[in-house]
Image (cartoon, coloured by chain):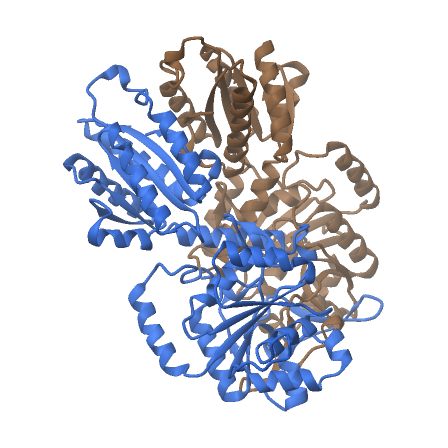
Chain colours: A blue, B brown
């Protein structure tokens, strides 16, 4: 499985609490992170360096920063960027309200950049001393899905051994080539591993390794663990990491990252009924149908009082109305989400499900009066705040088969709208 | 760039013709392909082995087979599957009309499976001799995007050198570990390469290598190139391949593969106007707007005569009507596509754009009479044949700003519908 447990702070609360307690107990020393983000991203085939490529309205690097911000025992995050990306980086930090992030200029190579980041943790730009962390984690800006569990393992091993790094089994056989481009020999796959990120170091170990290493290391070296071994005699502990550690390298990896985030955002939804019996019946039927489509559904009557906690928990809301005038409920939900600044990091979906109970057959295939225009207007405003509003109309039927088919269609369309999160289709009133 | 030039036979016809001529000229000897497809796919985290995982209604392995079927100088394809997947494989071959495919039982290891496939090219099951190919290409069923150009390179190098294989630069540093799980040393990255697929062999070289190799090679070996070197003294020529050679390994890779195919299917669309002046004006405006959204648009008046060639070229059709009665045009386009069996390998999109020129303001926000129901019915039938029908209604306006905004919305929604290809939203009449 390469799905992250959670790229947000929204699932499996109890499990996390336990973990946090465990984490807090064992990490009783200061930990910082250095994220080198100076790469040019040639391999993506895109003009923008990959750490700044955007999906779901947010640059990749912001997802990675968020991952570390969620970890309560990490004190500070240093991002190292090329000079030309400094303004962009500051803008990202400001736009997505990232905290405890220090931005530092990169050097001409990866190692120089990392050293700049490491140094910034103990010295201010003016040379003043800062309180250095005990352990520093080095990670890539383009590996957004690292989990807290694994960071804890790396951190504890680094504290004990001086250095620790993530490894993965080799996906392909590694071969040595002759100068003429022929096979020389192939390596015994079981003897080798791919060295990945994150890596962790006792601060003084990585600092000294960089102070002692040669210009050639700074220029051509690729492996921090190797420098710690060569210059500090520190044998790094290697820990096998999950596939989620993978590095966004090519354009296709951005699509994969987007699909992982979308899947995580689409695991559950909250149906708000307004309390009426008909709406509640529909909500319960939707709950069954959507569960069968692998979506967990909560049914609540409103979003006030104790129910308001759904506002901070869910990424998807389905507002059921039995009168078209109840469309105003959508406006209220929208305002509550806007006030809670809920869509800052991920787009939030609101689906208005309008249950038409009118007996008038002539209206059977028409949406009601001015609602489509009002919906489009609301949806246009909501989209500016990263909230996607869609509508689905269905007609009440006493005939069980017809009714069942309509509910099924609402469920399928709701799941599709939630999974696709298409900005171009907001404001539409679909027919079930 | 990791986008394939074309996963279908639908783009850049002239360029391909040149390549085919070049290919045909140089490959004047029989070439066959062996696709080992017996893997269990543990790493995807899915129950289905990854070669049988489906996206856009088709299993991954069918995409790979199609890739080889498109190459005119490849005579036959041997797919090696586990016994329990035999029925599934035969069903896939039947369902997607694959030709020249021989299905063979796998062995207990990868090498035994490949040898079974290689042997089937020269001996029938009853031991009768078959005319063996000169060169055999070995490829993975889970690398669907290999390009003809690169297959030609591998084939020609194999013919000349006896063996040839694809290599890629290492993405991560490779390290050797101690028995206790510590860093032993890291390899000099520039000296090594990842060995990938495809690989090509003179038939007799790979056949003999397998006949001479040990049980231990069959059991634990990973590298065909290595066997050719060890048992036939053949030094394989190594050729750097493009990133598209990548192997679908994890669940996220399936999302990446789907996005690559979707992107390729979404590069262009054909707008059919019916010939009226108003429809043509709208079509031309759409052409401009959609070009700005990176979609190439052809405008034609109908799909008959010379224009019928669009039926075999395009994956996306936009049918413009100025009378709702022209909805029947959608039915005709649908029938033409069904007759041409056009949606066998990829879902085809038809968007009905209904330009409402009625002066009656009361109808401004309503779709017309019985069309939504008729559309839903047509869309339901079309979906059974892998054709996705959507509708967009817009109102004619003399006011340039309003009109421009409507056209822009039609363009955006059309691009989104084409890119998302969501089956749940077919039959809907959206409002622009």
Above or below residue A150? Residue B421 is above
At 58% from the left and 62% from the top, the residue drawn is A142
Judged left or right of residue A330, residue B418 is: right
Residue A184, placed above or below residue A425: below
Q: Position of residue B74 (x, y in %)?
A: 71, 45
Q: Position of residue A193 (x, y in %)?
A: 60, 75
Q: Nearer the viewer, residue A13 or B36?
A: A13
Is B103 positioned to the left or the right of B149 in the image? left
Is there any visible trace of residue A361 in the rendered image? Answer: yes
Number of marks present in the image shown: 0
Looking at this rendering, what residue extends furthest in the bottom direction?
A233
Q: Nearer the viewer, residue B81 or A194?
A: A194
Residue B364 screen position, x and y as percent: 40, 16
The residue located at (32%, 55%) in the rendering is A313
Q: Quadrant of residue B311?
A: top right
Q: Quadrant of residue B9?
A: top right
As drawn, is A206 to the left or to the right of A15?
Answer: right
Q: Residue at x 51, y 78 (%)?
A: A239
Closest to the observer: A328 or A2? A328
């Amino acid at each position: 499985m390469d799905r992250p447990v959670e790229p947000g702070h929204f699932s499996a609360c109890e499990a996390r609490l336990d973990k946090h307690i465990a984490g807090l107990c064992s990490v009783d020393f200061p930990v910082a992170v250095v994220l080198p983000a100076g790469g040019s991203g040639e391999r993506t085939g895109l003009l923008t360096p990959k750490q700044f490529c955007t999906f779901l309205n947010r640059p990749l690097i912001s997802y990675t920063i968020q991952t570390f911000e969620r970890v309560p025992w990490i004190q500070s995050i240093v991002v190292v960027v090329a000079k030309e990306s400094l303004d962009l980086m500051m803008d990202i930090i400001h736009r997505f309200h990232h905290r405890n992030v220090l931005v530092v200029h990169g050097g001409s190579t990866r190692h120089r950049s990392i050293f700049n980041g490491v140094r910034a943790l103990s010295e201010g730009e003016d040379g003043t001393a800062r309180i250095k962390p005990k352990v520093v984690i080095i990670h890539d800006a383009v590996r957004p899905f690292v989990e807290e569990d694994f960071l804890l393992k790396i951190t504890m091993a680094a504290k004990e051994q001086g250095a620790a790094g993530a490894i993965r089994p080799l996906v392909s056989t590694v071969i040595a080539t002759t100068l003429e481009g022929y096979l020389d020999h192939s390596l015994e796959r079981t003897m080798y591993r791919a060295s990945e990120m994150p890596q962790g170091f006792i601060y003084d170990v990585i600092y000294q390794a960089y102070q002692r290493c040669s210009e050639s290391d700074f220029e051509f070296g690729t492996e921090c663990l190797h420098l710690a071994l060569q210059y500090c005699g520190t044998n790094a502990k290697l820990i096998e990491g999950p596939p989620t550690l993978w590095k966004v390298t090519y354009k296709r990896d951005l699509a994969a990252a987007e699909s992982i985030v979308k899947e995580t955002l689409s695991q559950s939804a909250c149906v708000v009924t307004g309390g009426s019996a008909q709406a509640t019946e529909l909500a319960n039927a939707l709950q069954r149908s959507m569960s069968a489509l692998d979506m967990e559904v909560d049914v609540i009557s409103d979003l006030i009082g104790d129910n308001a906690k759904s506002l901070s928990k869910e990424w998807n809301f389905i507002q059921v109305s039995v009168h078209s005038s109840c469309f105003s409920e959508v406006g209220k939900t929208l305002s509550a989400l806007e006030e809670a600044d809920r869509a800052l990091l991920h787009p939030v979906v609101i689906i208005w499900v309008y249950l038409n109970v009118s007996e008038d057959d002539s209206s059977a295939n028409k949406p009601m009066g001015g609602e489509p225009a009002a919906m489009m207007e609301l949806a246009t405003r909501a989209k500016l705040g990263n909230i996607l509003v869609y509508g689905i109309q269905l007609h009440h039927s006493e005939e069980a088969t017809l009714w069942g088919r309509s509910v099924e269609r609402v469920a399928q369309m709701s799941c599709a709208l939630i999974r696709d999160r298409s900005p171009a289709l907001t404001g539409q009133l679909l027919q079930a």
